C-alpha cells in the first residue's frame, strides 16, 4: 500500500526557521516539497540562502502570495512577526497552516497589545503537545501556532512542578541562547566579531516578547497566575538554548515527589526526556534533534527547585515542533520524519 | 626620584591564573618579576605553558618551595585549592602574600568543611575593595584572599541593593562563564570539541564551591542572612562571566531609588561601573580589563530587580583583582599598572 | 517484501568516530545495532560518552574482544591507529570489516614505516568510491580501509585535474580543521580555552601522517609521482575541514577545460559536488552531511589552479564514508541511510 | 623633564581599526586624544560603538571634516578604502598623517587600477619597519601608509628567505583569519550564526585586494618579480591571522641557512620573533599584542619551505603597526606604548 503524500509549501524559505523546516521535510517520507516563497529574496536560487539544502539548490524562491501558496495541502509560515495573519487569511479553511511566527500564540489580547502592539490576530491551537492536554488540542486541526523557542524550554521545564502544585507560582528563567534565534537580521550586535568571545543579556526586566507566552503556558499548567522573571543571554554559538529555571519549593515537598512528577509528565513522551540523576543536559547533545533534555536539582539551602533544559532553538524550538504538529494535524504518527539524535560533538 | 621596585614571585606560574598575574605584572611599573614556580611543570621554559608572555619566554619554572619563594617582597599564590595554606605557612610575616586560591576566603569553618572538606585554613583579609568597608580592610595588609570569579560578579551586582535594604534577602544568580575559569584541567567536558557549539550547567542546586562565598559577602552587605540560588553555565568562550542576578524588590521601592544606591556605591570606583540606562554590559567589552560593568532593570510584573554584571574571570575576576590588592597592600595608587580597557572585538 | 537486516557491531563506540557511525546507523533502514565496545570505558552506559545518541543511552559498552564482536554481519572499527589490525585478525573472512583507522590505508610498506613505524599491517580496498576506479574496488568486498579526513578533502579536490593532466604533479594543501578530528584525547592544546579565539598549525613540513595517503591517492590519479606539501591548521570549531589545494596549471590549459574535468568526474556522484560558479563552499553547509562541496578558481597571474573543498571530517570524512562503504560492500544502494543535507546554520 | 605630549585625532573612530588605535593610544604616555570623528555615526557617544573603551565612553563622535581634524599634531585615518585620499588632502604638510586604509600603499598605478579602480592616489612611505630598509624610510616622515593585515603576515613570513635568495620567487599563501578584518560591515556572511561552526574561503584565485601589496613587498625583498597565490580563509574567531606561506627551496639550500636568514633579519626586532625550534605560533598568543610570531619547517620530500606566521590583524596587523609608525615618525622610541604580550587564553 502506498502511503499518501502531502504537498507542502514553505513561506519564508530564505530564513533560518524556513531552512530548518525544509531540512526536516527533506527527511519526511510523506511530504512533497512544493512552493518555496520569500519576500525580498524572491527570484533567487534557494542555494544562495540555504547552501546546506543541496537537493533543493536550484529551486527558485517565489514571492509570498495567495497564488504561489495555492494548491498545497499544508503551508508552513516562517515569516517575521505580524505577517502570518494576513497570509493565513488568504488560505482556504481546508489547508493545514502551521505558523512559526508569534501572531497566533497569545490568547490574551491585552498581552498581545502590550508586547506586540496593534490588533490581536486571535489565537490558534498551540503547538506544544507535551503540555497538559496539549496533544488532544492538536489532533486533526487545520491551524497551529508553533511555540516560541524560549517558551518551549521554560514551559516544559517548569510545567510539571507547577501542575503538581509542588512549587510557588513565581519563577525565574535565565536562558543562554545561540544567535540563530535572532534570525538573519543584519544588526551589528549579531556580527560574528561582536558575538565570538562575548556573552550579553538583552530584553532584561520582563520586556522580551516571549515572556507573556511563558506566563500563559505556566499559568495554565498551575491553574493560578504565575509570574515569570525572564532574562535571555546571547552566547557565542549558533544553535541551542540552555534554560535555567527555578522556583521556590513548597514546604514539605521532597525531591523524590518532584522527580516523580516529571517522570509522570514525560515518561511516555518521544521528544522530552528527564535525564537519569547525575547527567546534565547540554545543547550540543540536541543540535539538530527534535529533543528537549531536562535535569533537576533541589537546593535545600535556598529552598529552590532548579530545572535545566536544553533544546535546539531551530529544531524542537521551531522547525521540529512545526513538523511534529504537522504530523498531529494530518493524523500521522507523531514522530514521522523526526530525529531525536543530535549532531555532536 | 626613582620609585621603589618590589620583587615579586608567582607560585603556580604555569596555569591560567598565574599567567594572567604575570601578564599584568609585566605592565606594572614598580614590580620586578622574580621566581616563577610550578609543580609538575618545574624545569620547563615558561614559553611552553605561557606562549603569550613573550618577554618571559626563556624563564625556567622552579619547584614551589620555601627556598625558591624566599627573598621576595610579594608572593602570589595561584595554586589548586587546598595548597596555598601550606605554602603560605613557610613565608615570613613581612612578605605580602596574595592568595588566588579559595583557602582563605571563607570565615565560617562550617562552610569550609561543607564545601571543601578538612580543616579550615582560616581567613585572610578579603580582596574586594568595592564592598562596603572593603577597601579599608586591605590597606597595608600582608595577607590577602583574592575572591573567586563568580562571587566577584554576583557580590558586586547585588551588594548595593541588599545593603540599602531595597530587595529581599533571597537571590537568584545564573552566570554564563567561559572555560578558563576551570583552569587547564584535562577533562573531557573541557575539550574544545565538547564546548564549542554547546552550553551546559554544572554544580546545580547549591553545590558549587563559590556559593558560600556569595552568601558570606551578601549577608555581610545586607546585615541579615541571605540565601543564594546559584547556577553556573559553561558557554563556548575562553574568558568572561556574564552574571544575571535577581531579587524580589521590597514594596514601594522605586527603580530610581535602586539606581541611586548603585551610583552611590560605585560612582567613585575606578573598576566598577554602572552603565548609563539603555546600555547593557557584554563580557567582550571587559576582556583583559580590570573592569566590572553593571546594568539593572526593574521587572514590575515579576516584582524583581535584575542586575547583569560582566567581568573577565581571569582579570577583575582573579589576576587583576590580585594586582589591585597588591597595590592596596603596598600603599601604591590602587590603579597602578591596571588597564580598564578591554581587548575588543 | 521485507528487506534484509544486517547485524552491526561498533568497536570504539565511545569516541567521536564511533559516535558518528552510530548516529548514522540509527538512520539506516537495514541495520540492527549489536555490540558496542570500548577499551577503558567498557562497563559504562553509552550515554556517558555519547549523550546525543538518546535511543542508545542505556546500552552498556562491552570490552573489545573476539567474543563481543562475534555474531555480527558487519564490524566497524573506530580504534586508535595500530589497533585495528589485531582486532580484525580475529574476525572471520565472511564478516564485513570496515576500518576507520589508518592501519590498512597505505599500500607502500616504506610509507607505513616512515609515518607510523613498525610492521606494515597490509592494505585493504580503499574506501573512496569517487576516485577513478574507486567504486568498482569496493563492491562486495569484506574489508574496507576508510580514508582519513584530510586525504578525503585533498584527494577529491585535486584528483580530476591531475587525472586529466591539466596541472603539474606538485601540489600545496593547507587545510583548516575543527578539533574533533583529533579525537577525545586529553591534551592541553585541545582544551576549549586554548582553541577558542586561536588558530594554529601543526604537523608542518610534511610530517603529518595523512601526507602519504594524499600522495598515494594523487599519484594513482595522475599516473605519475605527485609531491604534496600539506599543512593542517586547527581552528576554533568542532567539525569541518576546509581544504585549500593548489597546483601549477600546465601551459595552455583553460579554466573551462578544468571545470569540465571536474564536472565529468563528479557530475553523477551523489556525495561530491562542484558548486556553480560564484558559490564557494563552507564547512557549515556540510555539518553532519555525507557531502563534499568543491569550487575552483584559476589564478592567471600566479598560474595556479586553486580548489577549495569543504567536508565534515566526522561524516564524509569518516563515519559517513564508512556507511557509504558498508552499502557498497553489502550491495545496497550507495546512498542508503545517508543524508546529503547539512545542519546549518 | 616633562615629555612632550602630542595631540592626536582619529578619523573613523567608530570602526574596528579606529577602536584598536584608540585602545592603544590610551596606553601611550605621550599622546593626548583629541577629535574622534565618524561618518554615519557622528553625534553618537563613543560608548555606543566602542563599549570597551570605558575612559572615552562619553566622547561624542564628530563628523570627519577639515575643521574637526584641524589643530592636531597627528591624524590617524581609519576610513573605508578610497576615502583617505580626500581627507588627507585637506591636512597640512606638517601634520603627521597615518593612513590605515589602502589608498597609499601601492606604488604601481596599474596594480591600483586593477584591484581598486579609479585614479591612483599615489603612494606614501610604507609602514613596515621590519622589511629590508623599512625602518629608515619611516623616520621623521609626515605621511605613512599602514600595511594591510594579510600582507603583514605574508611579507614578514617570506621576505627573509626571498631576500637571501634561498627560495624560488613563486609563493603560496593561505591565511586563516578572524572576522574583524572585514570590519563592522552588515553582511549576512559575517553574522555570528553563519560564521560560528564554519570555515570558508573568499577572494580565491588572486582577486583579493591584498594580493598586489604582497607582490610589491616580496618583489622588493627578492629583487626579482615574485608571483603570489593568495587564499584567505574566514574562520570562527574575532581576531587573528594564521598565515601558512610556502615556496620551493632552491637546490642545495639547507634548513640551517634558512633559519639563519630569519635570525639575521629579525633577531633585533622588538615585534617580530622566530620561535625556538619545536614551538609553533598560535594567534591566541598574540591577541591584542603588537607581535608577529613565526616558525618554519623544511619539507624535504616536497622541496618546500613552509613558514607559519601568527598576528593579530587589528594590532600588529593594523592599529599597533599604526602606533609603531607614529613613534618612528615622531622620533619616539619605537616601542613606546606598545605591548608585546597577548591576552591569552
Image (tube, coloured by chain):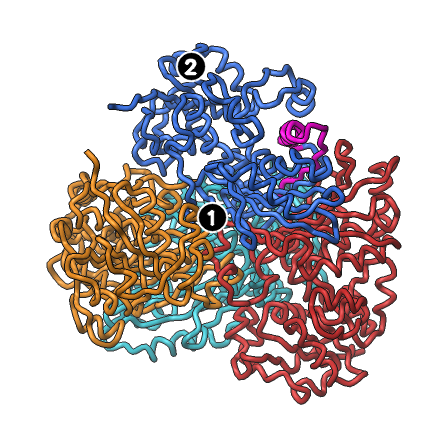
Chain colours: A cyan, B orange, C red, D blue
Q: Is residue D47 placed above or below C207 in the rendered structure?
A: above
Q: Residue D99 or C291: which is nearer the viewer?
A: D99
Where is residue D150 drawn, in percent x and y?
58, 36
**Residue C339's quadrant in the figure?**
bottom right
Residue drawn at x 62%, y 16% is D120
Mark toward the start of the polypeptide (2 vs 1): 2
Q: Residue B38 or B220: which is nearer the viewer?
A: B38
Discs 2 and 1 lie in a common subunit: yes
Q: Specify start and end residues of the magenta stretch as a single range.
A: D208-233
Which residue bears the numbered disc 1?
A: D285
Where is residue A59 drawn, in percent x and y?
72, 45
Which residue bears the numbered disc 2?
A: D95
Q: Is residue D131 placed above or below A149 in the rendered structure?
A: above
Tag on residue A256? none
Q: Is residue B273 placed above or below C133 in the rendered structure?
A: above
Residue drawn at x 34%, y 20% is D7
Residue drawn at x 64%, y 65% is A337
Where is residue A97 drawn, in percent x and y?
58, 53
Q: Is residue A145 visible?
A: no
Amino acid at each position: 500500500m502506498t502511503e499518501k503524500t502531502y504537498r507542502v509549501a514553505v513561506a519564508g524559505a530564505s530564513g533560518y526557521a524556513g531552512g530548518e523546516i525544509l531540512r526536516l521535510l527533506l527527511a519526511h517520507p510523506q511530504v512533497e516539497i512544493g512552493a518555496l516563497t520569500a519576500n525580498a529574496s524572491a527570484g533567487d536560487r534557494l542555494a544562495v540562502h540555504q547552501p546546506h539544502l543541496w537537493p533543493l539548490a536550484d529551486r527558485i524562491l517565489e514571492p509570498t502570495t495567495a497564488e504561489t501558496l495555492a494548491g498545497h495541502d499544508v503551508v508552513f509560515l516562517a515569516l517575521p512577526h505580524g505577517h502570518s495573519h494576513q497570509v493565513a487569511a488568504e488560505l482556504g479553511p481546508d489547508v493545514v497552516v502551521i505558523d512559526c511566527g508569534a501572531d497566533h500564540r497569545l490568547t490574551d489580547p491585552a498581552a498581545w497589545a502590550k508586547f506586540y502592539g496593534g490588533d490581536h490576530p486571535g489565537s490558534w491551537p498551540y503547538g506544544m503537545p507535551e503540555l497538559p492536554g496539549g496533544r488532544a488540542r492538536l489532533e486533526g486541526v487545520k491551524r497551529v501556532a508553533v511555540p516560541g523557542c524560549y517558551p518551549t524550554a521554560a514551559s516544559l521545564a517548569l510545567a510539571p512542578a507547577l501542575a503538581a502544585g509542588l512549587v510557588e507560582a513565581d519563577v525565574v528563567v535565565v536562558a543562554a541562547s545561540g544567535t540563530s534565534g535572532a534570525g538573519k537580521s543584519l544588526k551589528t550586535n549579531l556580527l560574528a566579531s561582536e558575538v565570538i568571545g562575548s556573552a550579553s543579556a538583552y530584553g532584561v526586566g520582563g520586556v522580551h516578547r516571549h515572556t507573556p507566552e511563558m506566563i500563559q503556558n505556566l499559568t495554565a499548567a498551575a491553574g493560578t497566575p504565575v509570574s515569570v522573571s525572564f532574562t535571555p543571554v546571547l552566547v557565542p554559538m549558533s544553535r541551542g538554548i540552555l534554560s535555567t529555571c527555578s522556583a521556590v519549593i513548597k514546604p514539605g515537598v521532597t525531591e523524590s515527589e518532584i522527580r516523580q512528577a516529571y517522570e509522570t509528565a514525560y515518561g511516555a513522551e518521544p521528544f522530552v526526556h528527564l535525564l537519569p540523576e547525575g547527567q546534565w543536559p547540554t545543547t550540543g547533545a540536541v543540535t539538530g534533534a527534535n529533543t528537549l533534555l531536562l535535569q533537576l536539582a533541589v537546593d535545600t539551602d535556598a529552598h529552590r527547585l532548579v530545572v535545566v533544559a536544553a533544546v535546539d532553538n531551530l529544531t524542537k524550538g521551531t522547525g521540529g515542533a512545526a513538523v511534529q504538529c504537522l504530523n498531529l494535524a494530518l493524523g500521522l504518527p507523531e514522530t514521522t520524519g523526526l530525529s531525536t539524535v543530535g549532531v555532536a560533538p
